[in-house]
Image (spheres, rainbow, N blue to C red):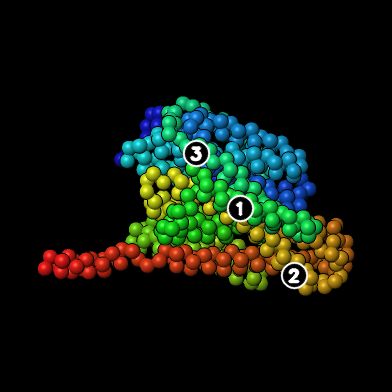
């Protein structure tokens, strides 16, 4: 097999660089969240939205981008999205307060999600020969994994050598290079039979995801009437989405594919990975910095133990899928991931917890996500007919990002409740409700040094800060249990959805069929 050369090599370099930028913006930002809490005066909910705005926006734009790229040209749309991503990254780097950064992150997510989807469309058209196509997609997958896997380390190094703004600003010159490579190497392509945009489905699904995320993160601060109103609006939006997809002649989601057990079982893999592993990467730096007292660079290095196994273990998952089918490989990967979270809970609970006590859980969780990832993607697309593979991929990616967006909010809620429960057990009614809420938010954001500023009484109640630190540890323990137990349940559900081994069933049926044919001949 020959690696792509000439114009195809330039196109591949541009596409891979674009996918690298997309991954970096997911995994490098969590490392700087403790810094943002201080310099931007951001509270814990602001930090959640700095991350969640990106993922929600990606979900919003995914299905629309495929239609627009098919209709107006994949190269043209990709060029536009790269420019938009660079501009949004510039705004992020220049932001002076949390609200501006959240808005800029949403714009960055719109551009990044569209850019990432275009990378797949461009590769599919640019590389059509079997050997070269396989190598191109392998290179794309490796580079995408590098973006996700090394993002925490890169973010930590940038903060150590410069300042937090460059975590975003670095994307501007890199996007310019990617744009030049795409212009020089990618051949334009479009689909004359492109379907119409499912605007109703896009709007209703986006409103539902945003509504549920807003309710989880902000619900405690809303008046009861407003809280129920937001909940009702999110439910109505989701019902409207289901109706829109049933009546639309060109739906984003064809729900009939969920009748295919292989597809539905693989979707449980999509949900499981983003139920625990990826949302937790947002909160891990807070625990490493504030719970274990490491600096940003050390936290980034420690996160490599969490992400590197994800990069090296996909071949294991693919080998398991070929040997034992997806019905074994995907649930086994999720089970391994869940056990990793349980090991993290145990490692964080021991006296004098440090990176060594957490290392087994980090490695096991990373191994589990790597085993699950490739079989899940291969199964969602292979379980439907070729003409529906694009739609299946869209559901796959949407399931991942929607689950990620919702669980970023849910994990934050679990963390806050764990901290609040610990504080109440330690201080009883000594803290006023408003002080308890303010202290809980500061601890959840990792700013333990500011708790006595918002509640001066803590200087008398907890002069050493030991009880505050214990509250942070308990909150993270709750999150680890939530992630571990939840994904283990999803592993069991996935195994049940996959059902029995179809290959063995068909083999058992062969003698019966032969006997029936023989009897018919007699």
Pair 2/1: label in front: 1
Mark 3 and mark 2 in contact (Cβ < 8 Å)?
Answer: no
- 384 to the left or right of 22: left
Mark 3 and mark 1 in contact (Cβ < 8 Å)?
Answer: no
Q: Is residue 492 above or below residue 159?
A: below
Residue 220 position by quadrant: bottom right
Residue for point 66% across, 34% down: 90
- Please name the residue that numbered disc 2 is placed on: 422
Residue for point 41% across, 43% down: 137
- In 3D space, how far apart are the residues under numbered discs 1 and 3 (Cα atoms)? 22 Å
Q: Quadrant of the N terminus?
A: top left
Q: Position of residue 427 (x, y in %)?
A: 82, 71
Q: Is residue 449 above or below residue 190?
A: below
- In 3D space, how far apart are the residues under numbered discs 2 and 3 (Cα atoms)? 47 Å
Residue 180 seen: yes
* Dot placed on the residue nearer the N-terminal end, 2 or 3: 3
Q: Is residue 189 above or below residue 491?
A: above
The circle drawn on residue 238 is 1
- Please name the residue that numbered disc 3 is placed on: 66
Nearer to the camera, 362 or 354 = 362
């Amino acid at each position: 097999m020959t690696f792509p050369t000439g114009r195809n090599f330039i196109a591949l370099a541009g596409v891979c660089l674009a996918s690298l930028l997309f991954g970096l913006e997911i995994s490098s930002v969590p490392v700087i969240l403790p810094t943002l809490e201080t310099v931007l005066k951001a509270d814990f909910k602001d930090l959640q939205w700095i991350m969640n705005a990106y993922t929600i926006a990606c979900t919003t734009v995914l299905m629309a981008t495929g239609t627009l790229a098919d209709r107006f040209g994949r190269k043209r749309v990709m060029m536009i999205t790269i420019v938009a991503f660079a501009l949004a990254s510039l705004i992020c780097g220049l932001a002076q307060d949390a609200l501006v950064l959240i808005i800029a992150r949403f714009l960055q997510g719109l551009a990044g999600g569209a850019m990432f989807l275009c990378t797949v469309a461009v590769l599919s058209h640019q590389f059509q020969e079997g050997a070269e196509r396989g190598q191109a997609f392998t290179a794309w997958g490796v580079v995408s994994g590098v973006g996700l896997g090394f993002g925490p380390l890169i973010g930590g190094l940038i903060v150590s050598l410069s300042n937090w703004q460059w975590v975003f600003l670095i994307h501007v010159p890199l996007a310019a290079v990617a744009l030049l490579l795409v212009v020089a190497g990618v051949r334009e392509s479009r689909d004359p039979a492109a379907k119409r945009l499912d605007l109703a489905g896009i709007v209703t699904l986006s409103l539902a995801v945003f509504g549920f995320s807003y309710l989880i993160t902000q619900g405690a601060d809303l008046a009861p009437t407003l809280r129920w109103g937001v909940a009702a609006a999110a439910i109505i939006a989701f019902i409207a989405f289901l109706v829109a997809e049933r009546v639309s002649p060109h739906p984003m989601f064809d729900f009939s594919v969920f009748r295919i057990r292989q597809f539905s079982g693989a979707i449980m893999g999509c949900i499981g990975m983003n139920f625990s592993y990826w949302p937790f990467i947002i909160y891990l730096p807070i625990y490493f910095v504030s719970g274990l007292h490491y600096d940003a660079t050390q936290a980034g290095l420690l996160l490599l133990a969490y992400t590197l196994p994800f990069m090296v273990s996909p071949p294991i998952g693919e080998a398991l899928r070929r040997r034992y089918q997806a019905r074994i490989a995907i649930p086994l990967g999720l089970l391994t991931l869940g056990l990793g979270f349980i090991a993290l809970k145990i490692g964080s609970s021991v006296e004098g917890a440090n990176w060594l006590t957490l290392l087994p859980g980090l490695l096991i969780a990373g191994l589990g996500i790597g085993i699950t990832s490739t079989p899940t993607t291969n199964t969602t697309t292979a379980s439907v007919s070729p003409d529906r593979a694009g739609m299946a991929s869209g559901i796959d990616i949407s399931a991942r990002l929607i689950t990620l967006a919702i669980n970023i909010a849910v994990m934050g809620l679990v963390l806050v409740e764990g901290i609040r429960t610990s504080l109440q057990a330690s201080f009883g009614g000594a803290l006023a409700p408003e002080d308890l809420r303010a202290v809980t938010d500061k601890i959840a954001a990792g700013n333990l040094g500011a708790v006595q500023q918002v509640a001066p009484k803590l200087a008398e109640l907890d002069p050493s800060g030991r009880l505050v630190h214990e509250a942070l540890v308990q909150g993270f323990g709750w999150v680890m249990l939530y992630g571990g137990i939840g994904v283990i349940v999803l592993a069991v559900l996935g195994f049940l959805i996959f059902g029995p081994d179809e290959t063995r069933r068909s083999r058992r049926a062969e003698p019966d069929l032969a006997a029936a044919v023989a009897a018919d001949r007699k």
